Amino acid sequence: MAGPCEVCFLDGEWPALRDARISPLDRSFLFADGVYEVIPVFSGRPFRFPEHLQRLANSLTAIRMTDPFDRAGWRNLIRELLERNARTQGDSYVYIQVSRGAEWGRNHAPLPAVPPLVFAFCSPFPAPNEELMARGSACITAEDIRWNRCDIKSVSLLGNVLLRQQSIDVGAQETILLHEGMLREASACTVHVVRGGCVLTPPNSQHILPGMTRSVVEELADDLGIPRESRPVTEQELRSADEIWLASSTRNVTAVTQLDGQAVGRGVPGPVWEKMWQGFQDLQQRLATTPW
């Protein structure tokens, strides 16, 4: 995977990313008191830009922070970030983090009235691994150990990190999370289950991040005539699925062909996934010349 681009945005300035520094008293450093957003950029155009900004605003509201920019301000910041890094043509992704800021000392509460700190950088979009796309991903399952407000895109990701590491330790690509016999999501993506040609996705809740790519899957399913349902999905339905997909901003939608060492369906990417994957490619091409 290519490394991040050279120039970042930090607290109103445009330093080299390697030289960027924050205060050790910043609350995102001390308490993980902040939120973030990741926006894919295809052909220099941020993908589902309004929806990503709305999710960022929702996360800020949930942690009792005021959005530091309006939509025009965020648009200008992202446009300049891409321009300064010569990323206005190719595919990239933009990472945005908003911290509550730094106060003099370390106090859990009351929440301080200090200026928030905004940080953003961009990076080339990870190219699809052709071999992995052809054979599909291997996943494991684990009990969901994260906190109970996963609908907030918080920078507090230790649970996600430890869960993802479990899959890395056994040579898999992702960890799919279960709780009391029900499917939630994966450590860093939405999970979709295909049974009898119908795409099943657990409904959004405080235990699941409202994924941007999830909503694309749902819209494309409708456009492509693929039946879908948003409803609770049991562990048994997951394990006996015809197909399993992972969906995220930096993966689009990928097929899972092995779960806990057992084949999913026929053990190869399935026909419904192939239809959805092509739908994603067509959508990106259609949007490439659309103003944002």
Image (cartoon, rainbow, N blue to C red):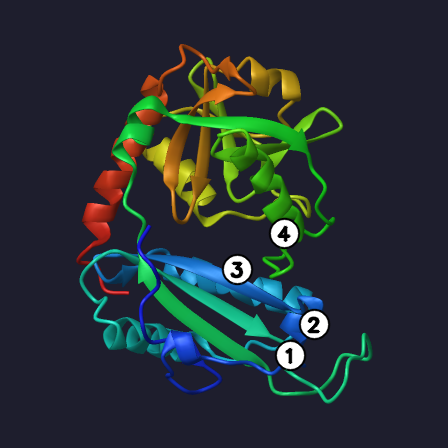
Q: Which residue is denoted by mark 2 in the rendering?
A: 30
* Mark 2 and mark 3 residues within 8 Å of each other at the beta carbon: no
- Left or right: residue 142 versus residue 267 is right
Between marks 3 and 1, how big is the CA–CA gap? 23 Å
Q: Which comes before the other along the chain, label 4 or label 2? A: 2
- Name, please, the residue furthest toward the top: 266
Q: Earlier in the sequence, mark 3 or mark 1?
A: 1
- Tags 4 and 3 touching, CB below 8 Å: no
Residue occupied by mark 4: 151
**Tags 2 and 1 touching, CB below 8 Å:** yes
**Disc 2 to disc 1, how far (Cα)?**
6 Å
Q: Is residue 214 above or below residue 70?
A: above
How far apart marks 4 and 3 lie (CA) works out to 9 Å
Q: Residues within 10 Å of mark 2 (few under 14, many from 20)?
A: few
Q: Is residue 25 visible?
A: yes
Crowd around label 4: few <14 · some 14–19 · many ≥20 (10 Å): some
